[in-house]
Amino acid sequence: MIDFINSNKVIREIADITRSSGYEAYLVGGYVRDLLLGKKTLEIDISVIGDALSFAELIGNHFGKKLSAVYKNFGTALLQIGEYRIEFASARRESYSKTSRKPKVTPSGLEDDLSRRDFTINTLAVSLKDQNNEVIDLYGGLNDIYKKIIRTPLDPYVTFSDDPLRMMRACRFVAQLEFRIESNTMQAIKEMKKRLNPDEKVVSQERITDEFMKILASSRPSTGLLALFKSGLLEIIFPELHNLEGTEQRKEHHHKDVFYHTLQVVDNIAAKSDNIWLRFAALMHDIAKPATKKYIEGTGWTFHGHEELGAKWQKKIFTRMKLPFDKLNYVEKLIRLHLRPIALAEENVTDSAIRRLVFEAGDALDDLLILCRADITSKDPAKVKKYLDNFDKVERRIQEVEERDRIRNFQSPVKGDEIMKICGISPGKKVGILKKKIEEAILEGDIPNDYEAALRYLYKIKDQVL
């Protein structure tokens, strides 16, 4: 039996206060679920029969902490104790209108409080007063955890009508817990998916995007993304991604279907990096293939320019999904450059081409190389080995050029102020032209990347420009 009460010192002390103060309080939801699954969690939910706010104050005073937030209308308070984030909530019944996911709240008992939760695996409770560690399971949550099933405690049509975001949460739990959505629950999602349409204005884009990014942050994002696709939600929340399915491509080092290839690339990245924006770039790297698809006799399907178009689409996608614009340039760059490294595997590729890639990638170079390796998804081991061997060569050449020429993030060794002084000109277009010519000469290998060589080159070319 799992010792919920003594699972950590904070809960043990809260249980002591519960018993001595006469309050009736329960550990509920994700904390109970995750302990049963052997997962560590730092978020603790406590349901209180009666006044949760006064109980939260009592606990806060015991630990010498002030409440982080209080929501009187919902009878909810937050308290941070060390690494634990604790939410206290008065047991309640909720009712919803069709146009809002904000409930009307009335006090109630434990059964009503558990029934309002999203899924049976989150309806489990353990009394802090009795301390017998018995799991209260009114809706079959223990069996669903055992069977790895995501199911609503009430009629799924009611549960999802009350709060449509729960449909996204179902897919997120698929990814985070590696569970599957029960058939009736899945059918309800399919039939109610339009409740997440932005035009409905029931769920904010920010909340939808937050759930989507949690799926992307999971250890194997493809499971949640596939659940979004099969449920029909992906078509509503991310149509560009949904439209990848059914787009065939030449096999080469990829899966045949662009959608399933993309899922594999994202999983490959997830196995190597927790960088959520590298994962997002992987999700987007072939996003414009359906729009650029063309069949050429003797060659097969081609997607010329998909990398450039996909990069251009990102501003629209970031805007619609309310993603942070400080990540836009990074994602655009990775999409725009993702074909370049493998093209450098040819024997006759010049050092100039290598220098230009290093220069254009800048700080994103290492992530670009991770993306390119992840992009090799063929099921043919011989093809995978061939492409990986070629990629090893590319990485060695990049390293050699980078160590020799110091190109990454470089700028003209001769700065603008000095160019103006030497040439006797004021700030303007000609200063930029001269700087660009010096940088181009370095990238082409005409001059080394050092100050003296760049200065000599400036004196050599300045009269041509001026």
Image (cartoon, helix red, strand yellow):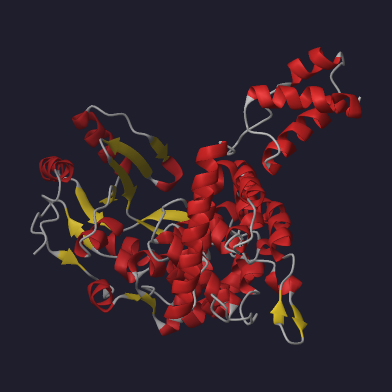
Tell me the quarter of the image containing the C terminus.
top right
Q: Position of residue 154 (x, y in %)?
A: 39, 74
Compared across the picture, whether 111 is left or right of 156 comes to: left
Q: Which of the two residues, 251 or 323, is positioned nearer the viewer here?
A: 251
Tell me the quarter of the image containing the N terminus.
bottom left
Compared across the picture, whether 454 is left or right of 425 comes to: left
Residue 280 vertical placement versus 42 (above, below): below
Q: Position of residue 377 (x, y in %)?
A: 49, 73
Residue 109 in view here:
no
Name the residue rendered at 64%, 60% in the picture. Answer: 348
Name the residue rendered at 54%, 61% in the picture. Answer: 282
Q: Which of the two residues, 34 or 344, is positioned nearer the viewer here?
A: 344
Compared across the picture, whether 439 is left or right of 118 comes to: right
Q: Position of residue 461 (x, y in %)?
A: 83, 28
Q: Position of residue 80 (x, y in %)?
A: 30, 37
Residue 135 vertical placement versus 384 (above, below): above
